[in-house]
């Protein structure tokens, strides 16, 4: 980043120009991108910013409470949309269809909220790698390629569209956002849905949510990965309490990266891996097996879908 302060001034001016006299709705997920967007927009247009947190039912454990605590004083509106997200995901197994279904649902929720609040513009925390990967046809990031064309907004404002993640973190620091937000691991827009291979159900999401929480507890503070998480990758035979079961297989992924475009797996100590695996299988009844993914990106992506 050449000049963080100059970026901030330019972004604020641009938001003011694009928004005109209108109200601007945005999805605040609590990640660094959307938090930086919210902070810039709050400076630019004050209470004409309408931040919404959409509880898709696909978020990490404890996330909604965390958001309430962090942004409660920002006039944040929390929308419980889990039922409608699970409804559109029913029977969908193709990864691209899943992403599109989620992206479209997000936009419908925003449109509804925009109507309710009289907002005319949409603000999004799209960053440069999101655009590159969507344009390159690798996958639809929910906040870009998955967006239906018939949107009812006068404009879509994307102040971070030319920044890499580490640059967004610099801006977060300069804006005085809490360190917890500035250094937070990226979390994909479609949430835990891309960490369940195949059809997404409430039951599978519950399992993967618990597994993610255990992985974060073991790895985040001690190993400072760019990202670490668990995914539900299939089923296999297991034996628990003398009973054979067709149990779920959890894959653990922990990577270093600069910008998400390439990534390398962490070389984790064996005792950490075995202890984490044991906790996952003992605390989550349906899980019979845990594997550690040692594939770099490329050829694998970071997420599973
Ligand atoms: P992949 O799986 O493509 O992920 O190697 C690269 C980085 O992007 C995150 N990711 C997303 N972020 N919307 C987002 O905002 C999405 O649809 C999305 N899909 C993946 C992923 O977690 C990783 O950090």
Image (cartoon, rainbow, N blue to C red):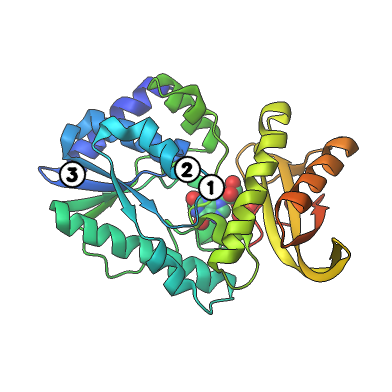
Q: Is residue 72 above or below residue 198?
A: above
User: Regarding mark 3 in the picture, which secondary structure is present there?
Assistant: helix
Point 40% across, 40% down: residue: 34
Q: Earlier in the sequence, mark 1 or mark 3?
A: 3
Of the 4 image quadrants, the one containing the C terminus is bottom right
User: Looking at the image, which is closer to me, 28 or 2?
Assistant: 28
**Do callouts 3 and 2 mark residues in contact (Cβ within 8 Å)?**
no
Work out how far the residue at label 2 is from the one at label 1, CA to CA, in angstroms.
5 Å
Work out how far the residue at label 1 is from the one at label 3, CA to CA, in angstroms.
32 Å
Point 67% across, 50% down: residue: 211
Work out how far the residue at label 3 is from the one at label 2, CA to CA, in angstroms.
29 Å
Q: Is residue 92 above or below residue 248?
A: below
**Do callouts 2 and 1 mark residues in contact (Cβ within 8 Å)?**
yes
Residue 218 locus on image (x, y percent): 72, 35
Residue bearing the label numbered 1: 60
User: Regarding mark 1 in the picture, which secondary structure is present there?
Assistant: loop
- Quadrant of residue 194 in the image? bottom right
Q: Is residue 136 above or below residue 66?
A: below
Point 52% across, 70% down: residue: 98
Residue bearing the label numbered 2: 63
Residue bearing the label numbered 3: 19
């Amino acid at each position: 980043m050449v000049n963080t302060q100059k970026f901030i001034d330019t972004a604020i001016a641009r938001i003011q120009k694009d928004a005109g006299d209108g109200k601007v709705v945005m999805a605040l997920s609590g990640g660094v991108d959307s938090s930086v967007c919210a902070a810039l927009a709050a400076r630019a247009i004050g209470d004409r910013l309408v931040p919404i947190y959409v509880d898709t039912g696909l978020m990490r454990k404890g996330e909604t409470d965390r958001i309430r605590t962090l942004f409660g004083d920002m006039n944040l509106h929390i929308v419980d949309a889990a039922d409608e997200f699970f409804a559109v995901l029913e029977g969908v197994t193709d990864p691209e269809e899943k992403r599109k279904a989620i992206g479209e649902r997000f936009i419908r929720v925003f449109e509804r909220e925009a109507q309710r609040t009289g907002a005319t513009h949409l603000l999004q925390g799209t960053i440069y790698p999101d655009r590159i990967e969507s344009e390159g046809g690798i996958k639809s990031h929910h906040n870009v390629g998955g967006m239906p064309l018939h949107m009812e907004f006068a404009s879509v404002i994307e102040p971070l569209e030319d920044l890499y993640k580490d640059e967004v973190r610099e801006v977060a620091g300069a804006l005085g956002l809490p360190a917890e937000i500035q250094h937070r691991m990226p979390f994909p827009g479609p949430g835990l849905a891309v960490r369940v291979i195949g059809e997404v159900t409430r039951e599978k999401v519950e399992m993967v949510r618990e597994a993610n929480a255990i992985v974060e507890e073991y790895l985040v503070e001690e190993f400072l990965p760019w990202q670490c998480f668990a995914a539900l990758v299939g089923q296999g035979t297991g034996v628990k309490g003398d009973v054979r079961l067709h149990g779920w297989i959890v894959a653990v992924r922990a990577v270093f990266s600069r910008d998400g475009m390439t990534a390398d797996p962490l070389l984790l100590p064996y005792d950490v891996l075995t202890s984490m695996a044991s906790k996952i299988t003992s605390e989550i009844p349906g899980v019979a097996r845990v594997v550690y993914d040692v594939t770099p990106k490329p050829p694998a992506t970071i997420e599973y879908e």
